[in-house]
Amino acid sequence: MKYAKQLSLRTIPGWSEHYIDYRKLKKYLKDAFAERENASRSDTENDQIMLNEAVDKFRKMLVIELEKVNRHYEKIEVEASASLGELNSRWHKGLSQEEQDQWRKDMTELLQTLEYLHEFANTNITGFQKILKKFDRTFYKTSTTSERDEISQQVQSNLRTTLHSEPEIVITNASGLYNLTCIPSRTSTASPSSNLNRYSFTPIGKDLWALVTTYSFVTSERDEALLSRGRQIWRKHVPLSPAATPSLQDLSSLNVEDASIPTMTSLDLDVLPNGIISLLWVILAEDGLGLPLKAPVMVAKGVKPGPVVGLTAALHGNELNGIPLIHRLMSQELDCTALHGIVVAVPVANIPGYLASQRTFSDGTDLNRVMPGKRNGTTSQVYAFNLIDRIVSKMDYLLDLHTASKGRANSLYVRANMVHEETRWMARLQNPQIIVHNTSPDGSLRGAAMERGIPAITVEIGDPSKFQKRFVRNALQG
């Protein structure tokens, strides 16, 4: 995928005008150097002038883009710093429930803004690295060694006049509980060989990169410091791992022989009690003997209204890491007495495949390629249809948990449609190592959910046929 397209997918809604205009810079490089390449090379002096002018104009355009990005970065950062101080000083034990709810809402929005700011900075850093790499390639194709030396001296001279000092910014909250002394906005002279530089720039590219690193959005860690502090304040007032719901202390209650677990023909959330975790079976099909094929379902129903968030695991029967993730989420992380909404989890979506330790259904069908199934079809098609109709259709959001296929090693990554606003946000919330942008493949559970208007993403968690605590732990944070 072209980088300009990647950039558009990573752009935060409402902030698009503040990003690097990568297409404009790229077009200028193409047009300016193409004009020079097509011109007569017989007039050496005029040729050098054209080259000087092209490079100088590119540098000026680069500065305009840098200033634009930096202004937005510093504006949001200063506003967020003030908001963080205000929110920290606002909290006290005497707050009413309504005031506490409003505080949590405001803090959630602030943390989202700080996460956006961090992503905004990193995306633009990559954009400037990419355009300078393109400048290097274009410039070297259309210049001689002597021309490069002269241009390098010119760029260095311009760079010295561009660099200047401004007072450093000190961010202090209203109550004085923390003080973040920040890197000066534009006084950094970070070496192009520092870890910010992922490319091997040519000498002129390094000079231009030195210019880029004078801007605070590139070298400052203020956004990370504010985000870290915001999360500390959040954890202080809103525990991330509340005590387990007493009704699910013993996961042995999931034993398939336990007759006390009710069976439903379709998931009915309205009949389930609030404030506890309910365990049940949902019938999805019949096997060759006419016996019911039942999927286990765990429902954490909060005491206050909210969305229905769904999780499915082991749709491929040998992809196991989602199973302990769901068990741990339900037994250790969720407190139904403080939950807004409902969490519906299907720890094993492909029962026959799981029991046979195989990826596919009992007839060899890949369930993630036949969705949404058929009401009257083969057993696997009926099973797929009822999984969607009887369980998934009750959800407002879906996270489908998978692992790599057999014979492959995997990381923690997400597949999502990054053009879709809700799935883009869901993907970012997972804090994965990688986000793969793609539309849902035909026949997939994610695709079938999206067709029903249910925002859905796929979370890939490590390798198949094994339980990996590290991946489960990291995925659980999302």
Image: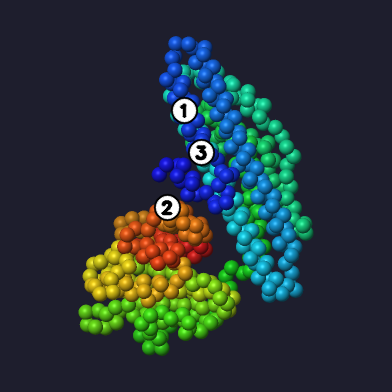
Q: Nearer the viewer, mark 2 or mark 3?
A: 3
Measured in 3D between alpha carbons, the distance from the residue under mark 1 to the one under mark 2, in whole angstroms, is 31 Å
| Residue 206 on image: x %, y % | 54, 30
Secondary element under disc 2, as helix, strand or loop, is strand
> Residue 31 — which label?
1
Question: Residue at the location (67% across, 47% down)?
Answer: 75
Marks 1 and 2, the one that precedes in the sequence: 1
> Residue 22 — which label?
3
Crowd class of label 2 (few under 14; some 14 to 19; many from 20; radius 10 Å): some
The amino acid type found where label 1 is placed reads Asp
Question: Residue at the location (62% across, 69% down)?
Answer: 239
The mark total stands at: 3
Question: Residue at the location (63% across, 27% down)?
Answer: 159
The amino acid type found where label 3 is placed reads Tyr
The residue wearing badge 2 is 437
Secondary element under disc 3, as helix, strand or loop, is helix
Measured in 3D between alpha carbons, the distance from the residue under mark 1 to the one under mark 3, in whole angstroms, is 14 Å
Q: Is residue 165 left or right of residue 157?
A: right
Of 10 and 462, nearer the camera is 10
Residue 396 vertical position relative to residue 226 in the rendered view, above or below: below
Can you tell which quarter of the image residue 413 is in?
bottom left
Can you tell which quarter of the image residue 381 is in?
bottom left
Residue 467 vertical position relative to residue 299 in the rendered view, above or below: above
Residue 137: in sight, yes or no? Answer: yes
The amino acid type found where label 2 is placed reads His
| Residue 120 on image: x %, y % | 57, 48
Marks 2 and 3, the one that precedes in the sequence: 3
Measured in 3D between alpha carbons, the distance from the residue under mark 2 to the one under mark 3, in whole angstroms, is 20 Å
